[in-house]
Every structure is written in C-alpha cells, then in structure tokens.
C-alpha cells in the first residue's frame, strides 16, 4: 500500500512521533493506522495517544441534578464557538438536558422520537430542526446519560463554561453539605485528570494483558541487557504507576498531594460519621473524538468569486 503524506501527517498528529518514525510505522503495518500507533508505542516513540481525546467540535455540555438522586448530562454540538456561547443555543441545551432527566429513552433514536416537553405537538427531532433554522448552523444532540443514585447522591460539575461536564454517583448513608462538597471536589478531579475507571476492580484482564505486552516491548528495547526476572519487576512497577493514573481512587488528590482520592473521601466520610463509596462517574468533553473541519478561507473566497 502506498503511504501518503496525509497519512504520515495524521499519524504524527495522533501520536506526536517524528515524521520518519511515522512513515516507518505505516510502512511496517501496511498503512493500518491503529497498528501503526501500536508499533510506535511498542518502540517508545509515541508521546501520547491523542486521537480519542482530541477536541475537534464546538458546543457545550450541560448537567442537571434533581433532589440529589436523579441526574442527566448531555453534549450538544454547534459549528462555531460563537454559537455555543449564544443565549438561544444555551437555552436549547438547557431544555434538552431537562428533557433527558425525565425521559425513559434508552438510546438517541428513541429520545429524538419522543414528544418535546415544551410543545408536545413536536418531537425532540422537530425541535432540533427548528432550532437549526433559527440559529443558522448545523446542531447535533450528540449523546446523553442518566443516573439514579438510589443509595446515596449524585453531584455535577461543569468546567470552562460547558467544555467539560462531570457527574459523580456515590453510595452514602449521610447526605449533607460536607459530603456533597467532597463529591463535588471528586468531580473536579475527574474533570482535571480524566481517569478511565473508578477503581482497579473495574479494569479488565484483557486491558491489563494488553498493557503488559506494550510495557514488555518498551522495557526490552530500553534494557536489552537485563534478565527477564528484572524486566518482569520493572513491568509490574510501571503497570502500578499506570493504574494510579487511570483509576480515580488511586490518583493523587489534586488539592492535597499527601492524599489519594480514596483517602480524601474516607477522611471526609469519617469526619461526618458516614460510609461513602464512589460508584460511578461520567465525563463528557465537548467535541472529543470528532474530526473538526479544516477551513481554508482563501480557497473559499476564491471559489465564491469563480462562481460569480
């Protein structure tokens, strides 16, 4: 397969690796982008895997919490940041999230087909289409989730005017301002540090085996002279370090470096005579994983002039 400059550029943007390294990875993997990323990771050349978290679309995330028990989070996209800050758009997203929290829809198709709460003669899809006509940009209700904290409470946190939204659900036998503040701080941690799991208990064996394979390849390349038993210990150490980064409760608590998140929650729980267990978090970041259209205004103007 011919390796194009565009493919090299895409892989470089995804990984941060050098141009020649990217070309070699694509050549070795016959142009398979995912396999090329893996190739670069195993050779220690990728600085980061940015593809999944790349911010490439505008819009906002909103949350709503009812009676500390029920909550919803939505992401609605617009074409420009200008529209995302518009009162008309913000009001629409507010209506959407309030509809979601009371909805029984299990997926987006069902949600779009249900009656719009503000005017039951319309569906949610009808309301979206009308809003597109009013605002003059393409809008998209991209995703939503609902949670029910039956045995405790749920808190929300919005960062950057809607760039990131977080819900944290906890089981707790005491719900007061101190406990809710604690969980709000945990939600801020989730927004800032973007963990993948609540605890190590959620990490699958397949994921661990995959990471061990990556770490083994890296360690053998960096330390070809070391025996296997030493490399095995190195892998265990590196894997534990990775778990502390991707598991929320194992992370260093950003507001007190002497504590992990788990120890911080336990500390507040004991101070309030409570039993608190963080059960779940949801983190939406606006536009993550969406490829943003690259505008070339010079070409656009030239095309318009040619059309005239």
Image: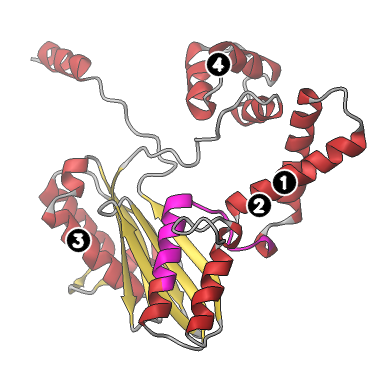
The crowding category of the residue bearing disc 4, from other C-alpha atoms within 10 Å (few below 14, some 14 to 19, many at least 20), is: some
**In the visual, does 95 lie left or right of 107?**
left
Q: Residue at x 46, y 57 (%)?
A: 190
Q: Secondary structure at mark 4?
A: loop
Q: Position of residue 278 (x, y in %)?
A: 54, 72
Q: Nearer the viewer, residue 198 or 257?
A: 257
Q: With 6 as the anchor, is 250 left or right in this view?
A: right
CA separation in Å, label 2 and label 1: 6 Å
Which numbered disc covers residue 18?
4
Cα–Cα gap, marks 1 and 3? 44 Å
**Residue highlighted by disc 2:** 243
> Crowdedness of circle 3 by 10 Å Cα count: few (<14), some, many (20+)?
some
* Residue 92, numbered label: 3
Residue 36 x %, y %: 64, 25
CB within 8 Å, label 2 to label 1: yes
Q: Nearer the viewer, mark 1 or mark 3?
A: 1
Q: What's the residue at 47%, 80% (across, down)? A: 149
Q: Residue at x 61, y 15 (%)?
A: 21
Which of disc 4 and disc 2 is earlier in sequence? 4
Q: Give the quadrant of the N terminus.
A: top right
């Amino acid at each position: 397969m011919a390796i194009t400059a565009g493919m090299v550029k895409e892989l470089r943007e995804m990984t941060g690796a050098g141009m020649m390294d990217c070309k070699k990875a694509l050549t070795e993997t016959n142009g398979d982008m995912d396999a090329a990323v893996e190739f670069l990771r195993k050779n220690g050349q990728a600085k980061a895997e940015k593809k999944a978290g790349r911010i490439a679309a505008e819009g906002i995330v909103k949350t709503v919490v009812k009676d500390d028990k029920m909550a919803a989070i939505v992401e609605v996209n617009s074409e420009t940041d200008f529209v995302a800050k518009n009162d008309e758009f913000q009001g629409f997203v507010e209506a959407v999230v309030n509809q979601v929290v009371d909805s029984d829809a299990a997926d987006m198709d069902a949600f779009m087909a249900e009656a719009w709460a503000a005017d039951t003669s319309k569906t949610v899809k009808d309301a979206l289409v009308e809003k597109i006509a009013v605002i003059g940009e393409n809008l998209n209700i991209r995703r939503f989730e609902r949670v029910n904290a039956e045995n405790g409470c749920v808190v929300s946190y919005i960062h950057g005017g809607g760039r990131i939204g977080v819900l944290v659900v906890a089981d707790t036998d005491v719900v007061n301002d101190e406990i809710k503040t604690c969980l709000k701080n945990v939600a801020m941690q989730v927004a800032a540090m973007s963990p993948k799991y609540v605890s190590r208990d959620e990490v699958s064996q397949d994921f661990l085996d995959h990471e061990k394979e990556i770490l083994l390849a890296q360690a053998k390349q960096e330390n070809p002279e070391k025996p296997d038993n030493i490399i095995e210990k190195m892998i265990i150490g590196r894997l534990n370090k990775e778990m502390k980064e991707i598991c929320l409760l194992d992370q260093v608590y950003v507001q007190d470096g002497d504590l992990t998140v788990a120890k911080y929650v336990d500390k507040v729980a004991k101070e309030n005579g409570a039993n608190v267990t963080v059960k779940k978090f949801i983190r939406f970041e606006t536009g993550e994983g969406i490829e943003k259209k690259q505008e070339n205004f010079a070409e656009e103007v030239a095309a318009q002039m040619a059309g005239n």
